[in-house]
Amino acid sequence: MVQNTRAERTGDVLAAVSQSGPTVSFFDAASDRLLGSVEVLAEPHEICFDPTRRLLWCTNTYEAGYYRANSGRRSQLAVIDPDARRIVEVVDIAPEVGPHGLSLDAERGRLYVSVEGAEGAEGAEGGSGGGVVIIDTASRRPIGRIDTGAFGPHWFVASPDGTRGYASNKEAPFVSVLDLVAGELIDRIEVPGGEGLAVSADGSRVYVAAPFAGGFNGGGPEATPGIRVIDTGLRRVVDVLATDNVVVPVHVTATGKVLAGELRTAPAPAPAAGTDPSGRASRPVQAPGRLTVFSADTHKRLGDIEMGRFPLTITSSPDGALAYAAGVIDSTVDVIDLETLQRLARLELPKLADAGAHGLAYIPKAA
């Protein structure tokens, strides 16, 4: 079954970002062979494929570094032709900064991009706060902006019908609910800080990784790590899919499986004999991550499998058979059969610093 599933992917491509590469690499989805790479501006983070125009959007988030620990915030998005493997255009959305999360409404030709607020404006609800920029995919130009009421809306997802949007805000203890038709913030749903999030195919549930892995939020050590399940009709958390460790990426497959990337740590190594013990690192080191699978219908835990260190992004094939999980520290993408929970391949991406594999997008072959 696995072999047939793989063979049917001939012509499909997986695009994968290396944050420090800085590159977007393209792999044959049937053979895992590297087809080529495109060099982009520094610190590419997330990518999103527009099937209507067959273009790949890539956010360039920082000059160097990461959230709350960077040397400057960028304002560009690269538009890439994945078939020719070349940059078509670099779109600058200045004065907006820190573009990161991407969500596409292909039917309406809108791309939503989460952006950070001005430094010192944490919690601001005006134009200086974080928000979501709306880009017209035909002109490739911004046509609007919606405030999220928080500094760092790092991840964003639009509902399948294009009427609602949800932003997780890392440090802020809520998910922002946006009316995408009226262009306004309409609600805040309490969660203990938020990381990745995903929406069900019918739009009735939003799955949010919380608490925030960076430790800025007010969730505290008592906050149960895992995934908060939001009923979008009631606009409140109705369940928690508990995990053993803090989760960053969340993804929902076409077959109704919720995929969570757990961060795992190991104790810091003891100092070598004869060395000053005061120099021992106090922070634990990253251990191999874990991909944990739940049923979206029953919320039952279906199993798990080890993956690369520090899971950052997860996606799946359109048929929901395969998962692709990026570990940023190892700079690897694990290809996983979701029926057997076996790793079929491990793709390696270039890494020049401590941050490698990041954004992922599955690109079906052209009709």
Image (cartoon, rainbow, N blue to C red):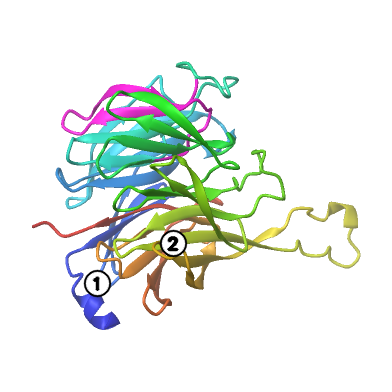
Callout 1 touching callout 2 (CB < 8 Å): no
Quarter of the image for residue 296 reads bottom left
Q: Which residue was labeled with disc 2?
A: 259
Q: Which mark is residue 30?
A: 1
Q: Earlier in the sequence, mark 1 or mark 2?
A: 1
- Badge 2 amino acid: Leu
Of residues 272 and 95, which is closer to you in this image? 95
At x 24%, y 72%, the residue is: 30
* Mark 1 secondary-structure assignment: loop
Q: Which residues are magenta?
A: 129-156
Image quadrant occupied by the C terminus: bottom left
> How far from the left and from the top, in percent, is residue 75?
40, 28
At x 35%, y 23%, the residue is: 145
Q: CA distance from mark 1 to mark 2?
A: 22 Å
Labels in figure, total: 2
Outermost residue toward the front in this view: 234
- Badge 1 amino acid: Ala
